[in-house]
C-alpha cells in the first residue's frame, strides 16, 4: 500500500474501506538472525536500515509495550545539526541529511518542518561561543547565521529583549533545523521495516539475555525464549537494566525530562527558540499548542512523570523569556526517561560480549538522531565495523578517557548534560 494524493482522494470518495494495516502483528519465531531489544525510534530505524541497506530480513524487534510508546512519543520533536565537537558534528549532520529525504524514502508523512532554530545569547561571552559553534557548523557543511538584536526583534517580537538580568544580544540561526511529528516517525519506520519482512513483536518484554562462552545466543522473553546470532540493546533510559541482564554495567544514569504543551493558539512562533540563560526551548505545533521544555529533574529515576520543582523551573524560564506565555493554559505535561552519559554524547558500539551491540547515551539528542542512529547501528551489526559518522561514539572512551566529547563543557556529571 502506497500513500499518494490520488489514493487519499479515492479512499475519501469510497468510504475509506481500502486501507490496510500499517504493519503485521506476528507471533515471535523461535530463532532469528538478529534481535533488537526496543521498539522505539532507534530500534525501528535500525531494523529498517538492516533490511533496506544490507538485505537482512530475519530480524525481530521486541517491544515490551506498544511500538513508539517510549521516548519517541515523549519528546519535543526538535530536529537539528548544530553540534560543535568532532564526533557529534558529523553524526548529526548525517542525521539531518537523512531527515531531509525521509518522507520520500518511507512514503510516509512524518511532518518534517524545517522552520529554523534560533539559539539566543545574552552576553559577550555567549556571543563568542555562538560564533565558534556557527563556524564549526559551517565547516561541517551545515548552515549557521549569527543574528543581531535588531534582526531578532523583527523575527521574534514577542520576546522580552530588555530584561535587566538577561538582555538578548542576538542569536545563532540554524535555518535547516526544525521539528517533525514524533509518533509518525516511529510509524513510518515500523511500516517500512515490516514491508521488508521484519517481525515487529509488541507486548514482548525481554527478561534475560543468554550468553555462552562470551557469545550471545538469544534472549528470554515473556512470550518464550528466542535464539539469535546477534542482539542489539536499543532501550534508551532502560539501557542499564537491559544490559544488567547480560552482566554489564553501563556508564549511564537515567533521569526524567519533562515537557509541556498549551492549549491551541493562533500562529505566534514560526521557529524553534532556545533561551541562553536557562535550559528552555519552545516551538508551536501544527495544532497551535506551544510545546516547550527545560532542565532534567536532577535526580535519577525510572518514573515517567516529573516533579513540581522541575515544572517551576521551566515556567519561570518561560515567563522570563516570553512574558505573554503567562496567559496560555497548560493542557498537559509528560516525562521521558533520558539515558544520560558522563560526557553528554551517545554510544553506538560493540559490547565485551561477542554479538551483543549497544545504542544508548542520547541525553537530549535522541529524537533528532533517529535516522542516523539506526543507519549507523545497522551498519555496525551487518559489517562489524563502525559507520564513518559514528566512529567516535565508542563505549571504551569512558574507560580510557580518550575521545571524550563534552559537548556542553560541564564535566563528567551525567545530570548536567
Image (cartoon, rainbow, N blue to C red):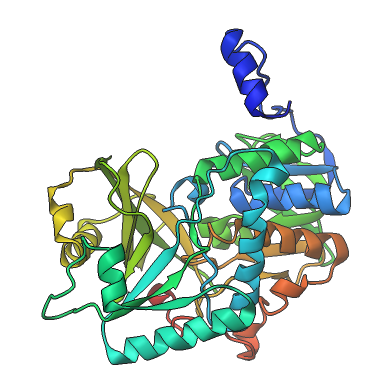
Q: Is residue 9 above or below residue 397?
A: above
Task: Report whether residue 370 is seen.
Answer: yes
Q: Report x, y in % for residue 335.
A: 37, 52
Relative placement, left or right, of 86 versus 386 is left
For the N terminus, which image quadrant? top right
User: In this rendering, is residue 4 above or below 91?
Assistant: above
* Picture layout, residue 105 above or below residue 382: above
12 relative position to 27: left or right = left
Q: Position of residue 174 (x, y in %)?
A: 47, 69
The vertical placement of 280 against 48, above or below, is below
Q: Is residue 303 visible?
A: no
Image quadrant where residue 118 sits: bottom left
Tag count: 0
Image side of residue 351 versus residue 171, left or right: right
Q: Give the position of the C terminus as an image quadrant.
A: bottom left
- Residue 345 spot, x, y in % from top left: 55, 75
> Residue 274's spot in the image, x, y percent?
34, 67
In this view, the residue farthest toward the top is 14
Nearer-the-camera pick, 51 or 228: 51
Residue that appears at 63% across and 10% down: 17
Amino acid at each position: 500500500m502506497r500513500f499518494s494524493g490520488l489514493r487519499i482522494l479515492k479512499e475519501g470518495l469510497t468510504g475509506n474501506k481500502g486501507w490496510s494495516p500499517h504493519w503485521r502483528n506476528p507471533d515471535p519465531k523461535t530463532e532469528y538472525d538478529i534481535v533488537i531489544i526496543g521498539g522505539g525510534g532507534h530500534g525501528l530505524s535500525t531494523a529498517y536500515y538492516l533490511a533496506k541497506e544490507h538485505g537482512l530480513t530475519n530480524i525481530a524487534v521486541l517491544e515490551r509495550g506498544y511500538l513508539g510508546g517510549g521516548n519517541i512519543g515523549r519528546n519535543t520533536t526538535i530536529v537539528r545539526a548544530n553540534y560543535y565537537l568532532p564526533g557529534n558534528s558529523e553524526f548529526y549532520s548525517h542525521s539531518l541529511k537523512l531527515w531531509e529525504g525521509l518522507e520520500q524514502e518511507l512514503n510516509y508523512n512524518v511532518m518534517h518542518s524545517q522552520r529554523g532554530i534560533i539559539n539566543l545569547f545574552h552576553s559577550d561571552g555567549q556571543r563568542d561561543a555562538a560564533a565558534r559553534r556557527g563556524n564549526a557548523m559551517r565547516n561541517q557543511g551545515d548552515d549557521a547565521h549569527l543574528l543581531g538584536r535588531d534582526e531578532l526583534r523583527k523575527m521574534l517580537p514577542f520576546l522580552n529583549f530588555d530584561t535587566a538580568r538577561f538582555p538578548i544580544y542576538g542569536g545563532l540561526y540554524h535555518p535547516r533545523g526544525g521539528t517533525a511529528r514524533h509518533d509518525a516517525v516511529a510509524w513510518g519506520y515500523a511500516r517500512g521495516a515490516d514491508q521488508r519482512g521484519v517481525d515487529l513483536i509488541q507486548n514482548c518484554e525481554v527478561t534475560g539475555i543468554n550468553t555462552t562462552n562470551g557469545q550471545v545466543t538469544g534472549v528470554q522473553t515473556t512470550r518464550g525464549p528466542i535464539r539469535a546470532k546477534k542482539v542489539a540493546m536499543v532501550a534508551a533510559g532502560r539501557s542499564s537494566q537491559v544490559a544488567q541482564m547480560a552482566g554489564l554495567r553501563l556508564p549511564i544514569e537515567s533521569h526524567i525530562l519533562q515537557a509541556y504543551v498549551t492549549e491551541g493558539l493562533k500562529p505566534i512562533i514560526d521557529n524553534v527558540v532556545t533561551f541562553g540563560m536557562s535550559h528552555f526551548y519552545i516551538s508551536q505545533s501544527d495544532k497551535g499548542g506551544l510545546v516547550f521544555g527545560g532542565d532534567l529533574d536532577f535526580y535519577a529515576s525510572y518514573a515517567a512523570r516529573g516533579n513540581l520543582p522541575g515544572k517551576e523551573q521551566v515556567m519561570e524560564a518561560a515567563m522570563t523569556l516570553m512574558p505573554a506565555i503567562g496567559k496560555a493554559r497548560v493542557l498537559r505535561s509528560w516525562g521521558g526517561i533520558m539515558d544520560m552519559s558522563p560526557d553528554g554524547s551517545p554510544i553506538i558500539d560493540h559490547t565485551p560480549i561477542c554479538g551483543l551491540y549497544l545504542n544508548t547515551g542520547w541525553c537530549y539528542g535522541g529524537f533528532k538522531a533517529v535516522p542516523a542512529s539506526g543507519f549507523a547501528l545497522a551498519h555496525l551489526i551487518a559489517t562489524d565495523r563502525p559507520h564513518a559518522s559514528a566512529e567516535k561514539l565508542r563505549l571504551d572512551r569512558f574507560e580510557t578517557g580518550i575521545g571524550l566529547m563534552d559537548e556542553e563543557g560541564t564535566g563528567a556529571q551525567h545530570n548536567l548534560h
